[in-house]
Image (cartoon, rainbow, N blue to C red):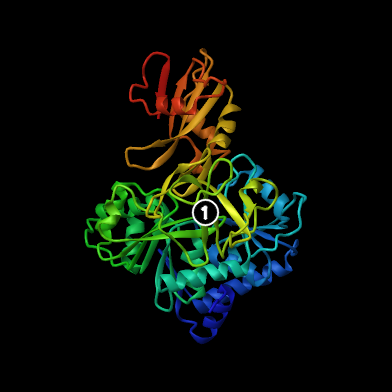
Amino acid sequence: MVITVIESVRRLAQVDPGRIAVATPVGTVDYGQLHRFAAAHADTLKSADGADGAVAVVCGAGDGGIPLILGAMIAGRPVVLLPNSATPAARAAAQRQTGFSLVASPGAGPEQARMERAEVEPDSPPPAASLVFCTSGSTGNPKLVPLREDAIARFAAWAAERFMIGAGSRVLSYAPLNFDLSLLEVWTTLAYGGTVVAATGPALRDSRHLAALVRTWEPDLVEGVPVLYERLARGLAESGDLEALSAGHVIMTGDNTPLPTRRVIRQMFPAASYYNIYGSTETNDSLIARLDYDEVVAERIPLGEPLPGVDVRLIDEGGTELRGPGSGELVVTTPFQAEGYLGTVGSGSFVQASPGWPGDIYFRTGDMVERRPDGALRFLGRRDFRIKVNGVSVDLEDVEDVISVLDGVTEAVTAPWTAPSGETRVAALIRTAPEQNLSAVQVRKFCARRVESAAVPFRISFVTDPLPRTSTGKVDRKMAARLLNDPAAGRAGRRLDG
């Protein structure tokens, strides 16, 4: 049966109001309280100046976001999930494309929530959606992904059945509410009567607080990008807590989980069922691989099998379907996907199905995948310049555009860089005039005001000579990446900061 989160919370507030809905490091909220808080937010939104159309909710690290978003749903208003780090330009672009008339920031309770009137004139009518995720916005051009209520409900129905989420289930929520991981961690859990174990406040920033929250509530399901598991392991070690955790389901997602991290996961959760899940905000989860104990620490882990109702295809550079073994771009359609982006940014990623394909609209993922002779799919890398940093999609060209406007910069190129920990980070090779003495600290501060934190360059190398070029005059990105990863970066004419 397909259930919506509004129906579930309303029903449980009546029949089992004392059941814990949300547990945080500072306390709990039962279903009765959650419904009262959400209803209060709904009343405020209905009576506020600018009460028509979509509402934007700023998704920060503090408490209060869940009842505020739920209240907007109850009020029948599309919810635009704005990252806390969204730049003013990105906010304005999102407002023009969604027409939101209010910006709401959560507080500890309904009385502490802040409402601001949106001043930018919209370019479009309100979206026909329940939630709108912002997948980017580093230079003021966010990709906005609208998800209808029925698509969210279908996803929740699959996830609840697959991972046995129901009354008594405890699910860790570490991702911010503007991440698509919240569809499973928060909205599926509440739709099926479980408890969201929310890593808010200090548990997001401090490893020991995160470890204490997980140890206290012992979630049945843990899902996360690599940084979650690394911080949790560090927090347990710093606390001297070496006892195994009892989660029944452990999901790796949002990024390529490095082998050292997978070893840590297996050590922390020795009795769990392990999964590698592939998906994107545009399509939600698409492929799932159930991993046995040994597969968790294999050199490469598979992408897995399509979820029920999901169809995947591989296409070559010319757009022709690859039917047998070989490599191509992964193209996906799912029962829980968006129908397209709002506005025109990235609109070419959604394409009409080719004759004979079962779906109507497919999403070109930009991921290169190998199909092996046995039919197994293996991830090869990105087709373009987008990478994922701790689960956040980063467009390298956007970062380059920002760096290039900094005083003293002649040109810049960015590339993914693998830190000693195995995490992917953004690296930047920057050409400056000989008389300039630009520092990495200046570059990072400049970028931090204009891009998401994941997009701020971690490793920066300065040169005074022109950047390497291909025979066609374009920047040679492969050569730049080799220079950025060169351990002899301090040779004449090069200066490495960070």
Residue 488 placement: quadrant: top left
Residue type pointed to by label 1: Arg
Indicate the position of residue 101 as horizontal and vertical percent values: 73, 57
In the rendered view, tell whether residue 327 sits above or below residue 293: above
Mark 1 crowd level (few <14, some 14–19, many ≥20, 10 Å Cα): some
Foreground residue, 61 or 373?
A: 373
Taking the spot 30% from the left edge, 52% from the top edge, the residue there is 262
Seen in the picture, residue 51 relative to 353 is either above or below; the reply is below
Answer above or below: position of 140 versus 432: below
Viewer-closest of 481 and 50: 481
Question: Which residue is at a point 29% across and 55% down the rendered structure image?
Answer: 296
- Figure label count: 1
Furthest toward the bottom, the residue is 15
Task: Please provide percent x and percent y for residue 378.
Answer: 40, 49
Quickly name the residue at label 1: 313
SS label for mark 1: strand
Which of the two residues, 170 or 278, is positioned nearer the viewer here? 278
Please tell me which residue lies in front, 25 or 457: 457
* Residue 211 placement (x, y as % from top left): 32, 58
Q: Position of residue 385 (x, y in %)?
A: 52, 37
Where is residue 36, by image quadrant?
bottom right
Say which quadrant the C terminus sits in.
Answer: top left
Q: Residue visible at 67% across and 71% down? A: 75
Residue 238 appears anywhere in the view: yes
Q: Does residue 63 show up?
A: no
